[in-house]
Image (cartoon, grey):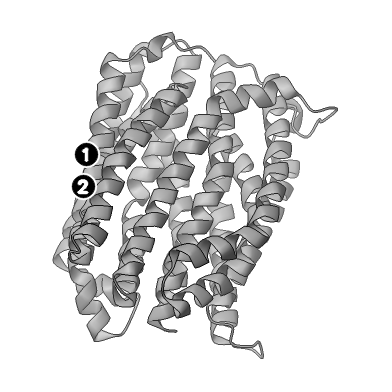
Amino acid sequence: MTSNKKIFNITYPIFLTLIAQNIINVTNTAFLGRVGEIELGASAIGGVFYFAIFMIGFGFSQGAQILIGRRNGEKNFSQIGTIFNNALLFNLLLSLAIFAVSVKGVPMLIKLVVISEPVYNATIAYLDWRIYGFFFAFLNAIFRSFYVAITQTRILTTSAILMAITNIIFDYILIFGHFGFPRLGIEGAGISSVIAEIVTLVYVNIYTFFRADIKKYNLFHFTKVDFKTILQILDLSIFIMFQYFISISTWFMFFIFIEHTGERNLAVSNIGRSLYILLMIPASALATTVNTLVSNLIGAGLKQEVLPLIQKVASISLILVLPLMISTFLFPEVFAQIYTDDEGLITACIPVMKIVSVANLIFAVSFIVFNGVSGTGNTRTAFFIEFLTLFFYICYVYYTAIINPSSVAVVWMSEFVYWIIIGGLGYWYMLKGNWRKKEI
């Protein structure tokens, strides 16, 4: 059975990576919380929209990660480069296509769904710059999938720290207009995030060229487009791409429904979102570890160890998350003060912060289980589980926000609906499903 030490050695760099990445999330939200509630709310819509589109490229990288992990488990190292090289090319072309559509399509879409003119203007001001990040973020995702799949994740920590520091510096300079730069507000947040992604991509390229075993893995040895490999990755990733896109798009709709209930509720929800993502870090890191270890175990012919591994990691996740849940539930106002100094906004945030702290406890187990499903390579099943779950989730959100308008805290209880269903279906599949017969 996979040892605690091995789980820790893979997980802790990913954990540190997620902390560094979420410093960006917290910094953007905290800085914009001191610019104004309109900007704070608009950054939620703009940020989640960008994240939904990014998930298309990230979903493809997850297919590459599963395939690389399987070849790594088989010790078929020469094939890893073919997967990596073609995945890089595909994601680059994908980012170009999405950017071209976004230039004209984003303003039209946001105009259709946002009713507040100030929120619309601020959202577009952010996204006009943020969409340039697709090029760099999509390529960064492939490098990340490679290092996670071969279980050499330490570079992810340094790259994420570099990204966080770059983002914080440029946020401070561009949002507030320091050191002779103009005060750009929400536009500055979009620009600084793109700069951070550029710096990160440059760093991981330099690291890979000078520190990775390029010859062993056959990296960057590109002679022609291998359509067979791309189609093989797509066969694994197409449902992950749809799954992630639909999942985050549904969260985008969540914030659109919240925006229809008022600008204050939108600002409250952005603070709740930022804390929620921060609390998710331990379980998210462990879930990524489960995904790659499940793929490696199956590749090594150790399918009997998959379920015990998932159960073991889920227990670890629960133990790590429990103290965080207690802290945020008992002292929500302390965490709210990170994001804003407006007393009225802090008070309004408290019920939502208590709900996300409890929801994170369910997430800590359910996300581990669901990543185990994806790690088996049966991404079609994972997609259908996600799709069914999202149906019930969006019905709940629409009813509580639009049909029978309730408090923003009641709307946020949709997280319980989501994670209970997806965790329950995922566990049932791991017990009863045919994943043991899946070959990739």
Q: Give x and y (percent) for residue 425.
A: 26, 28
Q: Are marks 1 and 2 in contact (CB under 8 Å)?
A: yes
Q: Give x and y (percent) for residue 377.
A: 47, 22
Tell which of 361 and 186 is nearer to you: 186
303 left or right of 98 in image: left
Rendered view: 306 above or below 188: above
Q: Quadrant of residue 143?
A: top right
Q: Give x and y (percent) for residue 220.
A: 78, 34
Kind of element beneath mark 2 = helix
Q: Quadrant of residue 191?
A: bottom right
Rendered view: 375 above or below 180: above
Q: Is residue 6 visible?
A: no
Rendered view: 390 above or below 381: below
Residue at the image point whose x is 60% and y is 28% from the top: 234
Figure quadrant of the N terminus: top left
Residue at the image point whose x is 30% and y is 21% from the top: 429
Q: Is residue 269 visible?
A: yes
Residue at the image point whose x is 43% and y is 56% from the top: 19
Residue at the image point whose x is 65% and y is 50% from the top: 98
Kind of element beneath mark 1 = helix
- Residue that badge 1 annotates: 420
- Residue that badge 2 annotates: 416
